[in-house]
Amino acid sequence: MAYSEHGDPGASLQVVLLHGLFDHKGTWSALAPRLAEAGYRVIAPDLVGFGRSSKPGFRSWPASRRYGAEAHVGFLRAFVESLGLDEVVLAGNSFGGGVFLRSLCTPWPGGPRVRGLVLESASGYPQARPPFVRLLSGLPGWLLPNRRVLGIGLATGLARVIVRSTLRRVFHDPSRIPEELVDQAIDILREPNTLYAYRAAARNLVPGDIARFTRAYRKIDVPTLVLWGAEDRIVPSRFATLFEAELPDATLHVFDECGHAPHLEYPAETARLIRDWMERRVTGEPSPAPCEGDRT
């Protein structure tokens, strides 16, 4: 698993940032340094199959398990343990939040002490697949992993159009889409097996046992910050109030005029909210540096 790191490697508290479906660690590039300023070690991995991490075929696995949430829980736990992380705050966007929830709902022998949980537009309840996920898991998605088809898409600019169209659904204000985010997505598409992994993840996005896990949310006894965009078109904002009601120690903040990724549309405000919440509910200590800016 590839990852980026910010802050003090010897910090007593580590923050692990986990991206969503079809995304990568670069999504945190505006948020991670702002959290590191507070004295935390901030680590952002690429899930297996995404970003710069390995993208194996898992041909010996049942198709229903390839790149599903359960597999990601196993990879993520091994990653955390390999880095020797012991006191962690887990912060996940969308699918990444769902992976963290699933991990906390099952025993983790020898795992770190989880001090807090941040759920940003997290997938955690049954819902219809967004249109672009249905497209990828259907017949068009079967064609895309073909290198010739992908090459035509990249050469003609069609891939860039699709990437920008997908990001427009993520953002409430399309003018806030960083061009480097588009460039990074295109570069990752050029890597072997990327679209194969995307298709497998899309087909296995909603675990068959998700109802069992939603019943376990009331047992997650760590302070939790729930962040959501009021204009989220990927994961309905009504789920934010469900998390607030079902998680025992939840604090909710909803961003006005914001889509599926507050950390991208309002990175400074998102960092300030996380840092203030960690000071109040996790560490009990004031941040050593202010978080500059607001809605920038």
Image (spheres, grey):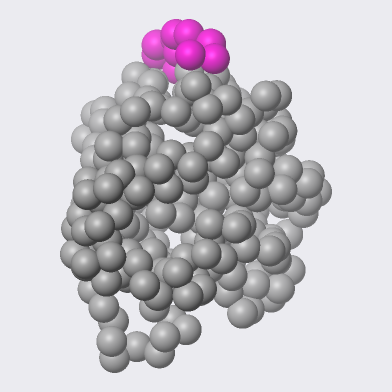
Residue 101, quarter of the rendered image: bottom right
19 vs 266: above or below: below
In magenta segment, residue 291 = yes
Instruction: Locate the N terminus and report the quarter of the image it occupies.
Output: bottom left
Task: Give the residue drawn at x 71%, y 73%.
Answer: 211
Residue 123 percent coordinates (x, y): 60, 56
Residue 195, quarter of the rendered image: bottom left
Task: Give the residue drawn at x 78%, y 46%.
Answer: 238
156 vs 210: above or below: above
Task: Give the residue drawn at x 78%, y 51%.
Answer: 242
29 vs 201: above or below: above
Residue 74 percent coordinates (x, y): 38, 71
Residue 44 percent coordinates (x, y): 32, 43
Residue 86 relative to residue 119: left or right: left
Give the magenta-colored segment's residue range: 286-296
Task: Give the residue drawn at x 27%, y 48%.
Answer: 156
65 vs 245: above or below: below
In magenta segment, residue 128 = no
Residue 286 percent coordinates (x, y): 49, 17
Residue 21 relative to residue 152: left or right: right
Residue 227, can we see it?
no
Instruction: Decide which of 182, 83 is in the foreground and name it.
Output: 182
Residue 166, can we see it?
yes
Instruction: Decide which of 50, 109 is in the foreground and name it.
Output: 50
